[in-house]
Image (cartoon, grey):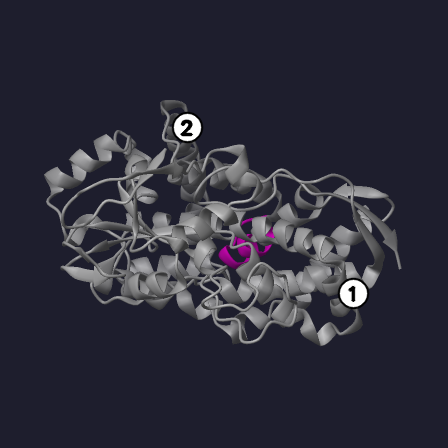
Amino acid sequence: MPLQNKSADSQTMTDQPVFDPLSPAFAADPYPFYAALRERPGLTYFEDFDIWLAARFEDVQTIVMGETMVRSMDHIATAEEIAEQKRAQNWHDMPHHSRFVQFSLLDSDGAVHDRLRKQVFRLFTPVMVNRLRDEIQTYVDGLFDSLADRSEIDFVEDLAAHVPGHIIGRIIGVPDEDCPQLRIWSENIVQYFDIDRSDARKELAERNTTEFYHYLQGLKAKRLAQPQDDLLSLMIEAEKAGDMNEDEFFSTAMLILMAGHGSTIDVLGSGLHALLKFPAEQARLRADASLMKTAVQEMFRFESPLPFFHRYTTAPVEIAGQQFEAGARLGVLYGAANRDPAQFADPDRFDVGRSPNWHTAFGRGAHFCLGNHLARLDMDIIFSTLLKRFSRLDLVEEPVYKRGLSVRGPKALRLAWTPA
């Protein structure tokens, strides 16, 4: 997958070293690749994804905060042009995926985005999220109790994977026993957002979207018959009031459930891996529990779980000395920006007390992550409990990280632990 130094004006090209986000080398350590991008002038054109990559913090910030930048092509292209691009990206002939995944709160802009975000925002404010602290702590304690007799665990599968989805499931109104299936659907749908768009992965994404939709139809019918104090019931009232339509209802429910799974599981795994790789920082955190909030923020900066997003330009714009016309597709590499030495001192060092730490792992502007308070609370509770209950943590084997441009997290994390 060659990178090209293609001028936005002249279209001249110069071959560059291979940049392959699906390679084992990139999965093991993407940061040398990111550093090489930051050293190049301007943005870098990635031909295989037809996108200009921004790797420096300043350029990423300019794009995500720009008033002329949007997530959806609806503002800049005709229906025929959008259909043509979807065909080129194998993003077509996916009826349920198109209805409920390709359109969402995440991929909408302006008044539509503001309207949908308003319907769910109230349950994700710091005050509302903090009300869940005792419930999350009780759930996490139960998980640790069930694992305490084991000398080794897979931290990702045995512990991390069980918390975010169950908590977000309870907020929405999903029964605990259904949450494991929702994680499977979510992972199989989200995988198609990365650069591997094979027909097999396409069929998997569409089939799982369909199953997810049918499940939510059934759950919605139950809430219509018997409303409860949950987000699903709140959204039903919003639909009755005309604040969202039926497709927006299911799309928003899917998005929140999917967002509540993968990225937090990934950063839990990579966050613990960082504590194990930097034992002095782990000791520092054990000695001063007040550092947990900054430690959690550092985990998001150090290994951003969603390292890549995109924007489209709606008007001509200059970025990093290059001119881009309306309709240009720009890729923001949060993972690269969060290791930029121009923004962070000693950026490749994990520092549990790093302050200030104005990272971009949650995005910026209108699309700032809705669930950031909940994700940080989950992590605060899990890591505080882990360090309190276990005096020693040892990595059994080096983890293998997931492949892809849009994801960053270990597939597994084999951990040996000693009770305190």
Quarter occupied by the N terminus: top left
Tell me the magenta residue range: 166-175
Outermost residue toward the front in this view: 14
Label 2: which residue? 201
- In depth, the one of 411 and 349 nearer the eye is 349
Kindly identify the residue that appears in the image at 76 percent across and 69 percent down: 284
Q: Would residue 242 be counted in the magenta stretch?
A: no
- SS class, disc 2: helix
- SS class, disc 1: helix
Q: Is residue 160 visible?
A: yes
Kindly identify the residue that appears in the image at 49 percent across and 56 percent down: 172
Q: In this picture, is 366 found above or below 226?
A: below
- In depth, the one of 128 and 401 nearer the eye is 401
Kindly identify the residue that appears in the image at 80 percent across and 48 percent down: 394
Main secondary-structure element of the magenta-colored stretch: helix
Residue 283 shows which numbered tag? 1
- Rendered location of residue 173, percent (x, y): 52, 54
